[in-house]
Image: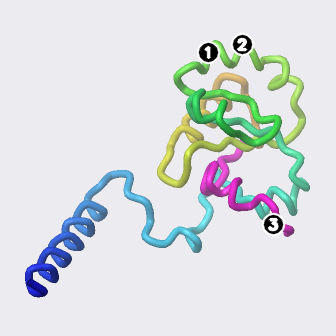
Amino acid sequence: MIRSAFLLLALTFLAAAATHAWHPKAPAWYLANEPLKDDEVDMKTIQQRWQGDVLWIDARLRAPFQKAHVPGALLLNDQERDALLIEHIEKLQDNTKPVVIYCDGHACQASRKMRTYLMETMAMQHVWVLHGGWPAWKKAQGTIY
């Protein structure tokens, strides 16, 4: 009985490791020390460099945005981007703050897609992707830098 349980556990671990190794969007095993990419910014930098005074853009779907989002964030996702861009065009054109875009987390690419879209469509500069996305923002709440 114990031998069967151990064998089942070992096979489960091997299947999980193989899935992780070959999955195209597999997250890193340990994300805390993952270096920032050139287009990323973390919560500590946002606080230190800009004292948190940025324009937040939420690239998630409408349902999660309506459930919870960064206060003052604009919803601008790929599924509704043209209609939402028209809705927020004045705020985006008048904006002088750095723009930080977030989505569901490390494996989510919606932030990068929206960053590219804004930089090409609106010729925006100083547009960053939040390292770790929405979970990083939630984790940082209450943290003093």
Dividing the image into 4 quarters, which one contains the C terminus?
bottom right
Which amino acid does the dot numbered 3 rest on? Answer: Thr
Callout 3: 10 Å neighbours few (<14), some, many (20+)?
A: few
Magenta span includes 132: yes
At horizontal 77% and vertical 35% (from top left) the residue drawn is 73
Q: Position of residue 113 (x, y in %)?
A: 55, 35
Please identify, in this view, whether the residue under mark 1 or under mark 3 is nearer the observer: 3
Residue depicted at 77% across the width and 20% down the height: 88
Question: Looking at the picture, how far across and down is residue 57, in whole percent?
Answer: 71, 36
Which mark, by number, is residue 86? 2
Q: Secondary structure at mark 2?
A: helix
In the picture, measured across the screen, residue 80 lies left or right of residue 69, that is: left
Provide residue 58's location: percent of width, then percent of height: 67, 36
Q: Residues within 10 Å of mark 2 (few under 14, many from 20)?
A: few
Mark 1 neighbour density, 10 Å: few (under 14) some (14–19) many (20 or more): few
Give the extent of the magenta segment: 127-145
Q: Quadrant of the N terminus?
A: bottom left
Distance from Cα at disc 2 to Cα at disc 1: 6 Å
**Where 87 falls versus 13 (above or below)?**
above
Q: Which residue is mark 1?
A: 82
Three-letter amino acid code of the residue under disc 1: Asp
The residue closer to the viewer here, 20 or 122, is 20
- The amino acid type, in three-letter code, at marker 2 is Ile
Looking at the image, residue 127 lies above or below residue 46 = above
Q: Secondary structure at mark 1?
A: helix
| Residue occupied by mark 3 | 143
Mark 2–mark 1 CB contact (< 8 Å): yes
Give me the disc on residue 145. none
Of the numbered discs 2 and 3, the one sitting upstream in the chain is 2
18 left or right, relative to 117: left
Residue mark closest to the camera, 2 vs 3:
3
